[in-house]
Amino acid sequence: MVNSVIAGLSSGGAYALLGLCVVLTYRLVAVVNFAMTAVGAMGAFVMVSLTDRGVNVWLALLIGAATAALLSGVFGAALVRWFAGHRERTKAAVTVALYVALTAIGVRLFGGNSTGAHRFPNPFGDPVVTVGSVVVPQSVPVAIGFALLITVAVGLLLTRTRLGLKLQALSERPGTAEVVGIPAPRLAVGVWAGVGAITMLVVVLVAPRLGGDFGTLSGLISTALAVAMVGAFRSLPLTLLGGLILGCLEGLSSSMDSIQKYQGVVPFLVILVLLWWRSRREVWDTAHSR
Amino acid sequence: MTAPALALAGVGVDRAEVQIIHDVSLDAAPGAVTVILGANGAGKTTLMDGIAGLAPLRSGTIRLDGKPIEKLAPYKRAWAGLGYVEQARTTFRTLTVEQNLLVSQSGDGDLGTVYRLFPELEKRRGLQAGHLSGGEQQMLVLGRALVSAPKVVLIDEMSLGLAPLVVRRLMGTVGELAGMGIAVVLIEQFANLALDIGTHAHVLRKGRVVFSGPCEELRGDEQRLHRLYFGGPPLSAAKTDAGAAESELE
Ligand SMILES: Nc1ncnc2c1ncn2[C@@H]1O[C@H](COP(=O)(O)OP(=O)(O)OP(=O)(O)O)[C@@H](O)[C@H]1O
Ligand SMILES: [Mg+2]
């Protein structure tokens, strides 16, 4: 059982990053991006299609990430261009539509559950450390390390560079930011592109574990949203923690035969519990403010 | 007379699909303070938002140094040389004083100038802007407009809620901005303070200009200002215009 929880950490690191991407998109460009993992999956499948044809893995990874960045950037530009003044829920609805469309196209192009499971390269599958009876697969340190790397890099970008400061300003007061000369539309497209590329890398990381069909990978958005909810779409540390916990929960549930087949429900349970918890607290707060 | 740095012609501005500003034409000369007065709700902020691009223009043209800017996105208007100090001291609260300046700094902008004008900002450069006093926040947003090396600066309700001493000090700074050759457009609650440092004044009522003229015409004339703000029996040619405008509105 401990083994499965530990193994769950490798998904956890990936989920943490997906949650981070959702929260960043929400905070920086004020969009809940349901299409995020579908875009990532597109990039990932461009990559495997290339490796299947014998293209070098790293080159394929680069092309896949660039594809995801481009696709995401185009979506971002479209939202900026046509939906700038609209409500958050309208923009979210647009991304839901994009998610549905992309998933349909992806399944069509790359095959669904039964037909088209692709082989994703899995260089990190072998166990590395064995502590007593506990086996730590190599994918765990890789996933956690990657999550830390991206988090630190994003953190440094936001706090140490002028570009990052502009993004923060934009997130805090979008109108004022534009008025002082911060090119909001361009930065927004940049954020979309960056998030697209990171998501693609994460999808590639988890694909060997989850099995390589498009629907599953593009459906990772439910996990990503659950994780983002742990951080209340605001807190980056809480989001990261939420990702790790969700990964462990999933690992735990996979170790118990009786509940294993409901494993996919875990994110929804987390969402439900969080919604219930928050609404309870709201009731509590309003009761007290009266 | 020098060419205006900012020239509005027939400007109409909407807010939530409702036209608030009607047919405003006015100029702001470089090196001078142009004063905009009007009662609460007259539409002063809406006009400024229209000029800066935060509220949609329904009609008219806006020229900055002769070039039309009314079709540009807000940030491009800023790049063209328009600075806008919004109402209510809109600092980026989570950024430090210096970071607030850095994000709006443009090629020719200089933090040194800001720190020379406001030494207290330099002392607090590492402090989060949200922790500054009201007066210091106002200095920061003024400074933030200045580091983008603007040709025109719009200032909305600079002295709202500030102590008289601070207000007098900031008025002095506004004069200095004009001294640097910037065209300043100043909206003020304290009409007399603004009229003291201004050259031309425009009074808005219900979204229309009901007075345009030299500041000395209004200086100290509380009664006339009151009539311009709230309407009343005609007093001058400008007033008659306003009467016509009003009947059109109602
Ligand atoms: N979002 C909005 N939707 C509809 N009407 C609005 C909106 N914002 C402002 N208004 C209306 O536009 C008019 C002008 O408002 P504005 O804020 O420009 O006035 P102001 O002259 O700046 O007033 P104050 O001196 O109080 O700042 C007011 O009647 C106000 O009610
Ligand atoms: Mg106002």
Image (tube, rainbow, N blue to C red):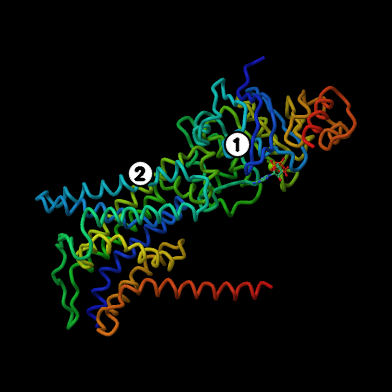
Q: Is residue B137 left or right of residue A123?
A: right
Secondary element under disc 1, as helix, strand or loop, is helix
Residue B117: mark in rendering: 1
Along the line of sight, the residue nearer the viewer: A74 or B132: A74
Residue A225: mark in rendering: none
Residue A74: mark in rendering: 2
Residue A226: percent from the left, percent from the top? 40, 67
Dot 2 surroundings within 10 Å: few (below 14), some, or many (20 or more)? Answer: some
- Quick check: is the Cβ at mark 2 less than 8 Å away from ligand 1? no
**What chain does badge 1 belong to?**
B
Q: Residue at x 51, y 28 (%)?
A: B80
Residue A187: percent from the left, percent from the top? 41, 43
Q: Residue at x 75, y 28 (%)?
A: B201
Query: Quadrant where the C terminus of chain A lies?
Result: bottom right
Along the line of sight, the residue nearer the viewer: B140 or A143: A143
Secondary element under disc 2, as helix, strand or loop, is helix
Q: Is residue B191 left or right of residue B98?
A: right
| Separation of marks 2 and 1 at Cα, in angstroms | 44 Å
CB atoms of marks 2 and 1 within 8 Å: no
Along the line of sight, the residue nearer the viewer: B82 or A224: A224
Residue B118 against residue A146 in the figure, above or below: above
Residue A42 against residue B182 in the figure, above or below: below
Q: Type of residue at label 1?
A: Leu
Q: Type of residue at label 2?
A: Val
Query: Quadrant where the N terminus of chain A lies?
Result: bottom left
Residue B30 against residue A48 in the figure, above or below: above
**What chain does badge 2 belong to?**
A
Residue A270 against residue B1 in the figure, above or below: below
